[in-house]
Image (spheres, grey):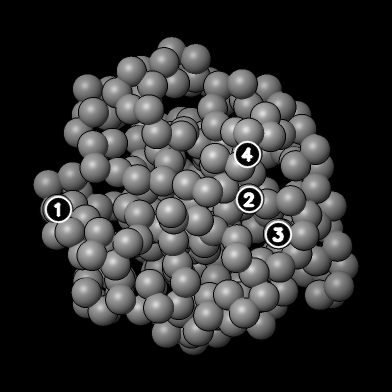
Amino acid sequence: MNRIDRRFDDLKKEGKKALITFITAGDPDIDTTYDIVLALEEAGADIIELGIPYSDPLADGPTIQASSQRALAKGIKIKDIMDLVMRIREKSDIPIVYLVYYNSVFKYGIEKFLEDSKNAGVDGLIIPDLPLEERKEVLDVADKYEIYLIPLVAPTSKERIKAITENGKGFVYCVTLTGVTGAREEIATDLEEYMRLVSSYTSMPKALGFGISGPEMARKLKSLSDGIVVGSAIVERIAKGYNRCEMLKEVKEFVSSLREVL
């Protein structure tokens, strides 16, 4: 069984929701990313979403775009991130998912990317710009290496939700709003209706992400889903310019506060 399935099964038995935390690999540097991942797990994260830096991340708002630029400016390469996951696997069995743009996978080589991801210890991929029509090629290779291709749906997906979630595995990443990532004070989407629609098409676990700024919002949304994804609010804390120890402490305290409400 994939680590993602195991984690959702365990959480269901415990009556808890999944806390999925996003960070950009290589921001501020690869060694600090390693420490942040272990700190996130200690603080109660259930799944780690590692963003592979990309020069034009269309789904990401200014906070995550800036983190990608910082990592790229340090010369981060996909091979460095594969090596990072191998290091993490020496210490941790937490589920790890890459958020990666399709061009990065294509340029690396689809087969090689999936093979290296499997060997490193990656459990799933989220490819936000992978067209539905081109998904089969990636899906076939992902299945070969037992890596889950996690479907991503949005409020605008509507009747396409069935096709998007078909053959997906792990969980459905349910984008809360139209637009890009970034912590917000409130979310205008009718999430109850939206989640009813998604649930009518798939029985996979569902995680709400984009715009979730802190524990209060997570508390309000947890009844609608099986998990919550928080990214920009964590990346903001990494970027604040604290010294390493203060930054890790701040991130751990924030993630612990999210864990408490889920």
Q: Is 185 situated above or below 36?
A: above
- Amino acid type assigned to the residue bearing label 4 in the image: Leu
- Foreground: 45 or 77? 45
Foreground tag (4 vs 3)? 4
Q: Is 44 situated above or below 119?
A: above
- Of pointers 1 and 2, the one earlier in the residue sequence: 2
Are the residues flagged by discs 4 and 2 in contact, CB closer than 8 Å? Answer: yes
Q: Alpha carbon of mark 4 to alpha carbon of mark 2: how far?
A: 9 Å
Which percent across, then down, holds residue 128?
34, 50
Which percent across, then down, holds residue 180?
45, 43
Q: Is residue 137 visible?
A: yes
- Of pointers 2 and 3, the one earlier in the residue sequence: 3
Q: Alpha carbon of mark 1 to alpha carbon of mark 2: how far?
A: 28 Å
- Amino acid type assigned to the residue bearing label 1 in the image: Lys
- Amino acid type assigned to the residue bearing label 3 in the image: Glu
The residue at which mark 4 appears reads as 11
Rendered-image quadrant of the N terminus: bottom left
- Give the mark count: 4
The residue at which mark 3 appears reads as 41
Residue at x 42% of width, y 84% of height: 79
Crowdedness near tag 2: few (<14), some (14–19) or many (≥20) residues, C-alpha within 10 Å = many
| Disc assigned to residue 136 | 1
Q: Is 75 situated above or below 258?
A: below
Q: Alpha carbon of mark 2 to alpha carbon of mark 3: how far?
A: 7 Å
Q: Quadrant of residue 57?
A: bottom left
Which percent across, then down, holds residue 226?
55, 32
